[in-house]
Image (cartoon, rainbow, N blue to C red):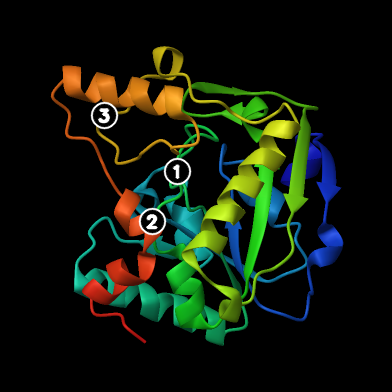
Amino acid sequence: MVRTALKLRVTWSGYDAIDPDRQYMVLALHESFVDVPLLAALPLDLRFTAREELFASEDFGAVLRSSHHVPVPETRSTTAMRLLVARLRAAVDDGDSIVMFPQGSLLGVEVAFQPGAWRLAQMLGLPVLPVAIAGTHGVWDHPFDNEVHLARDVHVTVLPPIEPSDWSADRARAMERSLKQSAIETRLARRFEPHRDGWWDEYAFEIDPDFDGLRRQVEAHRVLNHTEPIDRRSARENPREMWDSQGFSS
């Protein structure tokens, strides 16, 4: 198995919070493609979501397609979103739990969660299982470092599940903060340093307001380089409004 081949030294916390007889929307921090085989150790049947472009890639496309994982459309059109929901419902009907990386990025812990994952969990009737992962970038930090490093320490922290009936924007924000704090406390989390990693202007992401210094740095770069800042803040504060505007009201 991949975990054995990489000789990972994995520390698990909160593993007992998982009920293997239930289905979840697993929302995990993301810092490396190594996160995927690591999460596969959860006692659940998992279906991963991934950006649509990865399904066409030479490196991962064949594996993603053959394993029937779920592509996330590049566009936010109503047709594309309805197709995504239909694919996710089919996976749930097959008995699988869904894995989403709400940051949508490998840049680092400072990247803000994108809106929509909570609303999807509510629409599918799934409890959210929050998972903090830290240290996997030290194994394979693609696309910044293509060398694979063996025998690295990795921490995985599973927080208590959150039922759909307990959903709120405040609860979602508190969960995001708890996951990031858990990762940072391990001293293994990937940190985004634009002068080292690049600015990634061609990708849509925003910095979590809790990391205000970095957020201001990125915003200043965007202004200086006439790059339109990506502002999802209002949608993150009220994801129901965003989804309802696409015709997904339940």
**Nearest the eye: 155 or 166:** 166
> Label 1 vs label 2: CA separation?
9 Å
Seen in the image, is 195 located left or right of residue 81?
right
Residue for point 74% across, 33% down = 185
> Label 2 vs label 3: CA separation?
21 Å
The residue at which mark 1 appears reads as 112
Where is residue 131 shown, x and y percent of the image? 67, 53
- Residue reaching furthest front? 170
Residue 73, image quadrant = bottom left
Residue for point 37% across, 45% down = 57
The three-letter code of the residue at mark 3 reads Asp
Q: Is residue 126 visible?
A: no
Is disc 2 in contact with disc 3, using a CB cutoff of under 8 Å?
Answer: no
Seen in the image, is 77 located left or right of residue 211?
left
Say which label, 1 or 2, has the lower sequence index.
1
The residue at which mark 3 appears reads as 201
Q: Secondary structure at mark 3?
A: loop
The three-letter code of the residue at mark 2 reads Arg
Residue 57 vs 215, above or below: the answer is: below
The residue at which mark 2 appears reads as 236
Residue 81, image quadrant = bottom left
